[in-house]
Amino acid sequence: MAHNYLLEIGLEDMPAHVVTPSLKQLADKAAAFLNDNHLAFDRIEQFATPRRLAILVSGLAAKQADVEEDVKGPARKIAQDAEGNWSKAAIGFTRGQGMTVDDITFRAIKGVDYVYLHKAIAGKPAAALLPGLIDVVKSLTFPTRMKWGANDFEYIRPIHWLVSLLDDQVIPMQLLDIQAGRRTEGHRFLGEPVELATAQDYVPALLAQKVIVTPADRKAKIAAQIAAIAEANDWTIDLDADLLEEVNNLVEWPTAFAGRFDEKYLAIPEAVLITSMKDNQRYFYARDAAGRMVNAFIGVRNGNTEYLDNVIAGNVKVLTARLEDAAFFYAEDQKKTIADYVARLQTVSFHDKIGSMAAKMARVKTIAGLLADRVGLAEADKGHLLRAAEIYKFDLVTAMVGEFAELQGVMGQVYATLAGEDPAVALAIKEHYQPISADGELPTSTVGTLLAIADKLDSLMSFFAVDLIPSGSNDPYALRRQAFGIVRMIAAHHWSFPVTAVQQAVVTALSAADQTSGLDYAHNQAALTDFMRDRVAQYLSATTSRHDILDAVVNSTTVDVAGMIDAAAVLTKHQDDSDNKAVMEALGRVVRIADKQPVNVAVDSALFENSTEKALHDAISAAKSGYGDQPSEANYQALRGLTPAITDYFTETMIMADDPAVRANRLSELTGLAAMIHQFGDVTAVIVK
């Protein structure tokens, strides 16, 4: 007979961002517990509100499955002496299995007798095992934790009740002084405590107490209420997914409402209005039929419609105070010029070991100019890039960004536009922060992309120069994210970016411009190269299923970001070719020999001793004539076309000839060919079948 088991953790209100991941963690760990204890079940339903995390296990087996197994022990010659007496090894083996030597049987394996025990283990009832789930409750991890009372125990918020029901039976468990039972709490203001008769009563019983415990149902209700408000007012409301998720985890009984603020505040930039509503107050905003923002906000109350006018009035008052501040900052900021703000950056520290924000901008301008030349940026765009680099951090010292830090870059674009800067410059100021997360949006403009790369590259080189290198999970300056952002931007634009060469060019340029501030930017260059190599591997792990191909390309000697990505794509494309084994083996043999004993001298055809040497030399010369600087399909096909000549060459030619001149000539031929092959990384790492 299948059973249902309910586990609920009742807490003080959790932060909204913690609710969903904590619920998933509870469900995953509970499933692992049940599987580890061989308790079969059909599914686990998940329930959560700000005050509770709960799971309902359906189709739970009444007990563990009975287990029968044969356990192998020592060989007979070890288990018994010549007279048939049991040895200590045999006695110890049987005792360890909870049995005696009377239970021993023998089985022959390849002519040798071994001790065997047949064990029949009766499964334990579920009711006897489920109390162990208290360890799952204790094991949940959170970004922040707290203590309460005189306890040393830490959790996201104080725990006030536990429910543990197997059908209608309370499964005992205890955490601190809290005994699990069948009593749960309804809505804090609209409901009452309720005694659950059975585990399956959970959802309807709490619904009667004004608590919607199913997150998806609660979210659907919020969306429907907001849609009704939009329809009634002929508005379009952006139902931002992240904000909806956050609001959903702040309420147990949602009631959406709309409020109005003074039209005069619409003169404030939209970004400021949206931030004030969405990020600060968790309101949705609305637009009219023409797409213009209206002086309205949509909030969600944790309650019913009673006294809703008072709730709206209170929210209007709070939002108005925020908007009044924003309007003041906006007006005050425009009284100064961009040059005034840039001058103030001389006194703003980027990092106490590295220097000021103004010094960083000077370095970034130099790096940006270098990158512009590398990618062949048009002169007009280069001018926009250099201008953006001169001023791109100026909004950090504006009053608006001082109050609304999340608007950095956004206000830079707004103020730069008001000051008459070119739109390309203004957009780059906004975009240089992107991507702001591992999968965040990339800059849309070339100028913004190059400024973003220059800014992040300067941060990487500066922090590595002063030995502030991420280790383990410690990365206080988000250098991994910044490096990964560079990889993503390079991949998107398909620019050549040999990490070591770029670093050396930057060091040379900064030294020539006297912008090093006494720091050794060549320091830890190799470490930064390896750091970037790891980020490329991270990028490729999401697109390349073959780990051997990933290992091959990231071990490229040039560490060219785009080159490694292209090489992986080409090798992956041809991994199932009928001749892939022959190609990889031929190229791998060249590389293994050449890398072991490289020789770089001019190949002398007069030293050829057989026709295969000339044939390979001519084939390599032909391939080189059209061989591009970056890994490509054409380059792969050129190498692929060399396979027959390489195979014949090794069949007829002894590389390590007795004559030193002949030997060096042959090694030089292979060294040159290996250099072409290395464009695709370490092909010897590719596994072929």
Image: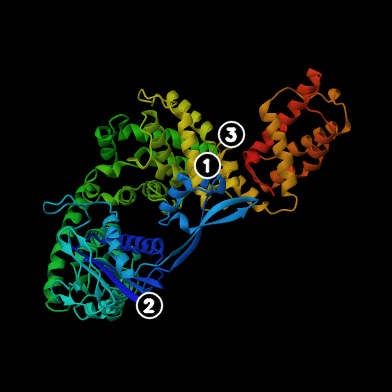
Mark 1 vs 3, N-terminal side: 1
**Cα–Cα span, label 1 and label 2:** 69 Å
Question: As shown in the figure, which amino acid type bears the numbered disc 3?
Answer: Thr
With 445 as the anchor, is 356 left or right in this view? left
With 215 as the anchor, is 460 left or right in this view? right
* Image disc number at residue 377: 1
**Cα–Cα span, label 2 and label 3:** 60 Å
Q: Which residue is mark 2?
A: 2
List the single residue furthest toward the front: 83
The nearer-to-camera label among 2 and 3 is 2
Q: Which residue is mark 3?
A: 557
Q: Position of residue 260 (x, y in %)?
A: 19, 70
Q: Position of residue 215 (x, y in %)?
A: 30, 71
Instruction: Say which residue appears at 39% left-offset and 29% top-offset.
Output: 465
Q: Secondary structure at mark 2?
A: loop
Question: As shown in the figure, which amino acid type bears the numbered disc 1?
Answer: Leu
Q: Secondary structure at mark 3?
A: loop
